[in-house]
Amino acid sequence: MGQRGRPGTTKLGNDSHGLEAPHRALTDSLERLALDYVDLYLIHWPLPMFDRYVETWRALIALQREGKARAIGVSNFTEEQIDRLVDATGVVPAVNQVEMHPYFQQRALRAYHDRLGIVTQAWSPFGGGGTG
């Protein structure tokens, strides 16, 4: 497939954690987007109750090595969850996309990201953030 679209960011759905499912999910996304790769592929949520985010991270590392994602990262991860990823794989996420707005500034998490070289990317719910 030739590069027909413009690469961007996509997220791994919560139903696609594990070692194999992320490969299928990204392949499907690339086909729908008419792309050979994405600039950034994120684990959308750690889903700690299922305890599969480390193996999911290993799958994203493999996808990056295959050239299907230029960078890999996470969304909604805590310091402890990121530490676990790094301790298990040696690979630091490029990005952690977290809820952040003037009423929820996440200063401690941002300082942690700075120490590890992780880009903090903000998201905020529409109509949220205490703006009434």
Image: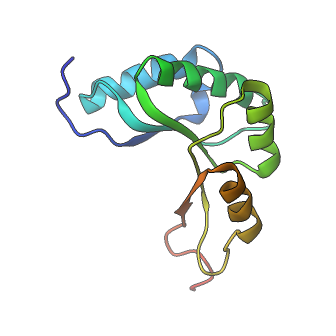
Residue at image point 68% right, 55% down:
113
Residue 31 x/y as whole percent = 29, 23
Residue 114 x/y as whole percent = 66, 58
Vertical arrangement, residue 71 with respect to residue 101, above or below: above
Q: Residue furthest bottom?
A: 132
Residue at image point 49% right, 18% down:
23
Q: Is residue 43 visible?
A: no
Colour option used: rainbow
Where is residue 6, by image quadrant? Answer: top left
Residue 62 x/y as whole percent = 55, 18
What quarter of the picture does the N terminus occupy? top left
Residue situated in front as seen by the camera: 41 or 127: 41
Where is residue 104, by image quadrant? Answer: bottom right
Q: Is residue 31 visible?
A: yes
What quarter of the picture does the C terminus occupy? bottom right
User: How many numbered markers are drawn?
Assistant: 0
Q: Residue furthest top?
A: 20
Seen in the image, is 16 located left or right of residue 23? right
Residue situated in front as seen by the camera: 116 or 9: 116
Residue 19 x/y as whole percent = 63, 16
Seen in the image, is 4 located left or right of residue 115? left
